[in-house]
Image (spheres, helix red, strand yellow):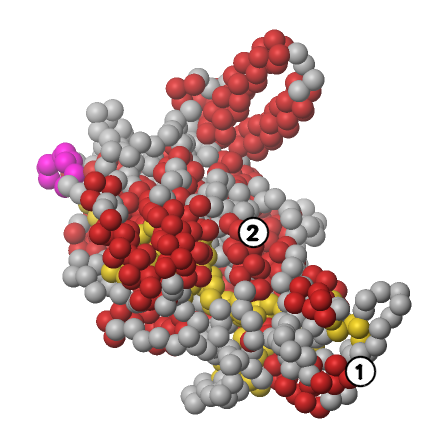
Amino acid sequence: MKVQMKKSWIEGAFSKRECAKIVPSSKDSHRCFQHSRYHQSSGPLYRGSAGCQVCQNLIRCCCGRLIGDHHGIDYDCPVFQSAKEKDNVEWSVEKDTKISPTDAFGTINFQDSDHTYHAKYIRTSYDTKLDQVLQLMIKEWQMEFPRLVISVHGGIQNFKLPSKVVQIFSKGLVKAAETTGAWILTEGINTGVSKHVGDALKCHASQYLRKICAIGIAPWGIIENQRELIGKDVVCLYQTLGNPLSKLSTLNSMHSHFILVDDGTVGKYGSEMKLRRNLEKYLSLQKIHTRMGQGVPLVGLVVEGGPNEILTVWEYVRDKPAVPVVICEGTGRAADLLAFTHKHTADDTNWNSQLKEEILLMIQNSFSFGQKQSHHLFKILMECMEYRDSITIFDAESEEHQDMDLAILTALLKGTHISAPDQLNLALAWNRLDIAKKHILVYGQHWKVGSLEQAMQDALVMDRVEFVKLLIEHGVNLHRFLTISRLEELYNTKQGPTNLLLHHLVCDVKQSTLPVDYKISLIDIGLVIEYLIGGAYQSSYTRKHFRILYNNIYRKHKNQEVVSRLAQNLSLHQLNQTGSRSGSAENTLHSQFIRTAQPYKYKEKSANLHKSKKKIKDEFTVSDDQESVGFIYPYNDLLVWAVLMKRQKMAMFFWQHGKEAMVKAVVACKLYRAMAREAKQCNMEDDTSEEMKKYSNEFGKLALDVLDNAFKQNEQMAMKLLTYELTNWSNSTCLKLAVSVGLRPFVSHTCTQMLLTDMWMGRLKMRKNSWFKVILSILLPPTILMLEFKSKAEMSHVPQSESHQFTWYHGDPNTSSGKDDLSLSNYDFDKGVEKQVEKQTFPNNNEQQSLPGTRKIYEFYNAPIVKFWFHTMAYLAFLMLFTYTILVKMKPTPSVQEWLVIIYIFTTSIEKVRESQASSSKR
């Protein structure tokens, strides 16, 4: 059904032209015309019959076909007017051709000695609507929208180029097309400059061959083996070997698409140039993306060529806006003539009659022109030189020549006179970092406020990692740049790599079917993060105060849109007053966006909790000087965005920057692993799940490498990195997240095992028979006083709960806790290692041994190993008592054993409820 609809649309939108009136091109008609004339009284018309085989096979119509090839035309129709007006008869494409639906479109298979190349093609009229041509190319042929159009012009006949020029031309053209996503436009035939373009694609773009869109726009009437192309949506086999005696040309097999322009003529050029030039202009009006001020850039490239190429350059440079042109000097004829004139007329003071005579002589020798034609072409050359800024000369044989791709792109920047932000946008679209460094982001360039930030947004959307790095180096502050609106735009972008799984995950967490154009909010992203990480983890995007602020902001934003629409009907004075008020409201709105992006900060004292709730109302109005504040950890938020959007290179970049490198790697590993599992369950492509597993393993290895490096630098501080509470990651720890991921190499690392052992033992210092000593101390509490305990220095890396911070002698106010000893300013979390040795002051050995008895008892019962054995022994006792109450007949009144069982079950239930409430209270 889709194929039939496609076929019917193409037949309705595209047409062919065929000659509908025979007008012999020969001045002397054959005798069959003379003998068959008759005169009509109604007018001086003469009719002829084409019954003579000589006329049919020798005399051609003005359309270029033999008279005998005009199938379906009644030869008794008027052939020419009276003999007196015979020489004034003209054949016209508009009047003397008929239009019918196209009968040639589909796919061409070119047979080569080694490969079979495929190309899309269509036969269409020269006056086809341009929007339909573009729709065919983008939607039906699935071509990527161009970010640059390189229109190559040159000679139609075969010509030779120096080997050095061929090498530089081929390499430069292919590189320019590959790196920028350009379309290359040529005549598409297997001779002249089109053949050189095809050879360039064949030699230098084998692995990217069909990624480069080389479009041949050729006249249908000059194509040899036309019959092989006739068919509707067919796959045809095309032979590129033509008849040496034929004046027709074959198609070049290295082109990916062909538009065969039909004006009803045969063996004539010219009709294709009208459609080609109109298509170039139409493409230049299409914007690469909505924020760019100009459309798709166009550049002309002249290689060799005849007088028509000079006329083409004349049209290009005089156009509004002017089209920059690159002239390949050393390729011959028109190109050398343009280059010579451009160089020798740079200084008006050197202009003299001798130079004029020299140029005229070059014109006569190059094109075999007479004096009148030479002077006319000389005049056109001089008019071209009036727009010399739009002409760039590329000399491949010069020792100081630059790469041709650079010449093409710099000619665009120089010749179009666009603003610096638009130039940067073009470099972004082309993905040419070298152009941005050398010609755009240069010293002394003035940038408007926010222009680089907009470029940063575009670089993130387009997944240009190197541009993001370059913009940061040139002063883009991510804390100022990243706002809620921009982050949401990044999650909803359709450009660059996208993760289809993210939409499915949002549907799962919202438990509803969402439309395709649904706009994902940060609250949705927070729910997805919590779903993927699991457990009691809570994203900062889903906290209660964030939801309140978020909803209030968008409610105000919606109200502002209503007010702005109503303001259009006000008087100018009222509009100015309203504008001032809405401006302040907009500043407040922007401030609220920024403030809501800040993660929730834990309040240590319960008294501050009530104040923090009260401050939520006050956070809606923020002073203007705080508008520069963005996300506290922008690299973390952008890392999560890159991971959820499956942009691995971008995720790696944000992991390398900012703080908390170890935990960022662990979180990325967890998110990728969870998404790989979800992708497999959603029956998505196998490659998607495997790709995410690969990315997860990469981040898991990075986390392990950071831990190993930190452990080699400082064991104590490496353990602190594992147990430090991370406010931006739901107050979790790196160790807790690694365990939830199931990152076995990380958990089995020596540093982690040492930490777990110390945490398991608590403050107890036992080397051998720890289980025996613990059980004995539980059964005989006085033996606790005989046990050894660790000092504060030995326990500095072990995490302590907030209500039981380690204190010396029941808490010395001058002594900081283990958590406070970890100064974030003293560490380079980008590398995960200590920047400088932390200065800590610990009591001496004599003080360490003077732990009082009450403190020993307290530390003993708080040790995890003691709690484990205590609960184990209590559970065994419960099982014995429970078994006893079940097997032994008891009295009607509850016995002591039954009361103990009831108390155990009740207290255990209370504990489970408490744990549940404690985990939910964090939300």
Q: Quadrant of residue 374?
A: bottom left
**Residue 630 spot, x, y in % from top left:** 41, 32
**Residue 849 spot, x, y in % from top left:** 15, 39
In magenta, the rendered stretch is: 837-847
Up the image or down, 362 lies above or below 842; here it is below
Q: Amino acid at mark 2?
A: Tyr
Q: Is residue 468 left or right of residue 284?
A: left
Question: Is the magenta region chiefly helix, strand or loop?
Answer: loop
Residue found at x 65% / y 59%: 127
Report, in whole angstroms, how far the alpha carbon at label 2 lies from the one at label 1. 51 Å
Of residues 393 and 612, the one drawn nearer to the viewer in this rendering: 393
Residue occupied by mark 1: 36
Of residues 60 and 646, the one drawn nearer to the viewer in this rendering: 60
Q: Secondary structure at mark 2?
A: helix
Up the image or down, 584 lies above or below 799; here it is above
Up the image or down, 729 lies above or below 699; here it is above
**Residue 279 spot, x, y in % from top left:** 55, 56
> Foreground mark, 2 or 1?
1
In this view of the protein, can residue 158 be seen by the observer? Answer: yes
Q: Amino acid at mark 1?
A: Ser
Q: Most extreme residue toward the top, as rendered?
A: 573
Q: Most extreme residue toward the front, as rendered?
A: 84
In this view of the protein, can residue 771 be seen by the observer? Answer: no
Is residue 288 in the magenta section? no
Residue occupied by mark 2: 282
